[in-house]
Image: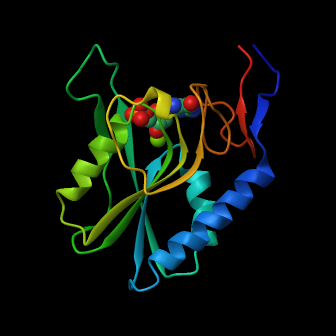
Amino acid sequence: MNREEPKVYIPEEAIRGRVRELGRRISKDYARVENLHLVGVLRGSFIFLADLSRALTIPISVDFLALASYEATAAPKAPVRLITDLRTDISGRDVLIIEDIVDTGRTLDFLMSLLASRGPASLKCCALLSKPACRKTAVRIDYLGFEIPDVWAVGYGLDDKERYRALPYIGIPGR
Ligand code: 5GP
Ligand code: MG
């Protein structure tokens, strides 16, 4: 088993600074709403959501859902499947999806349609990472931490077969 630490790609301090900045921008943009409802996509977003939520200076509530991706070959028309749904009704609420990383865009596309169909007052997305070179479905990311190239990123919530989620930085594992 490879015990080497992943190579640092985005250091802890850079993430902290960017999360603070996103927190300021989001707090400003939503200054006039009564409450911002954060919807975290499990499991990869849990650390980002924990830090971002504490960088916000507006009233928030938090809920989670869990998704799984099918292999493209198994279900080409439904690459994403809902595993655990939200616990609360989002109709009439201001919803911000919190994602770890947008790769092909299929997950976010699925999620935006699903949540939009439930009648929120507003629906936007905040992602820590985006790999624009890998996009297969056009999606809008309203708030983005970092653009990265086509690499496999781990750490700060993201895993490689369940390893590395608790790393404080974004890294690239040696193969
Ligand atoms: P998409 O539907 O945009 O192709 O994929 C989104 C999901 O694939 C992400 O939420 C994440 O779970 C997974 N994913 C895509 N790229 C990476 C990566 O570089 N590292 C990790 N750990 N997960 C990734
Ligand atoms: Mg994800």
Say how many tags the image has. 0
**Quarter of the view holding residue 170:** top right
Q: Position of residue 47 (x, y in %)?
A: 62, 53
Q: Residue at x 48, y 34 (%)?
A: 132
Q: Position of residue 143 (x, y in %)?
A: 49, 57
Q: Is residue 28 visible?
A: yes
| Residue 42 in the image, given as x and y percentages of width and height | 46, 46
At 77% across and 15% down in the image, what residue appears? Answer: 2
Q: Is residue 83 visible?
A: no
Q: Position of residue 67 (x, y in %)?
A: 37, 40
- Quadrant position of the N terminus in the picture: top right
| 12 vs 45, nearest the viewer | 12
Q: Residue at x 33, y 35 (%)?
A: 106
Query: 90 or 137, which lies in front?
Result: 137
Residue 164 image-quadrant placement: top right
The quadrant the C terminus occupies is: top right
